[in-house]
Image (cartoon, rainbow, N blue to C red):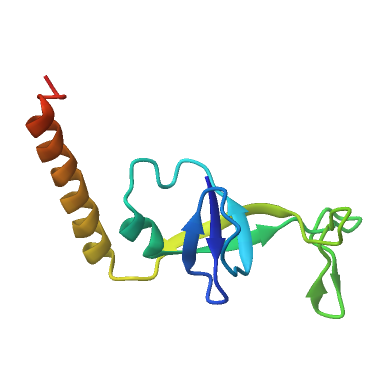
Amino acid sequence: MIVYTDKEDKIVAYGETTDIEYKNRVEINGMFENKCDEYIFGHKCIPHYKCELDSTGQDKIVNGKPQYILDENGNKIVDGASVYPWEEYYYIKSVQKSYEDSLIRMADLIGGAYE
């Protein structure tokens, strides 16, 4: 899944959309399967970038700044991300639970999809 974040690293969109202004576009896998929008948008996503390595295998630092590996367009290459809730965790969990309960009720109304 691709997520888009704002300047505060809050997730503002996901999927293959480019109709919004965003700071980062990060691909994450397996984090939000079967989760509702409110749950997803209650999280921040901070990308991690690939660093150049020095002769000892440590991240290369020049003048106190890490040296990142860049792609052909001059952009830093994303190498994972930190994802965590920025909203009250119990709130977004309750929203997700409510969403799942409504899906079950709808399935039961249309013919018992869980039989």
Residue furthest right as drawn: 55
- Please report the residue visible at 80 percent of the width from the left and 76 percent of the height from the top: 65
Q: Nearer the viewer, residue 114 or 16?
A: 16
- Please report the residue visible at 14 percent of the width from the left and 24 percent of the height from the top: 114
- Please report the residue visible at 19 percent of the width from the left and 58 percent of the height from the top: 94
Q: Is residue 90 left or right of residue 30?
A: left
* Rendering coords of residue 49 (x, y %): 71, 59
Q: Nearer the viewer, residue 55 or 30?
A: 30
Q: Nearer the viewer, residue 56 or 53?
A: 53
Name the image quarter holding the C terminus.
top left
Residue 15, placed above or below residue 70: above
Residue 11, placed above or below residue 78: below
* Rendering coords of residue 58 (x, y %): 80, 58
* Rendering coords of residue 59 (x, y %): 79, 61
* Rendering coords of residue 6 (x, y %): 55, 71
- Please report the residue visible at 80 percent of the width from the left and 61 percent of the height from the top: 75
Determine which quarter of the picture holds residue 90.
bottom left
- How many marks the image carries: the answer is 0
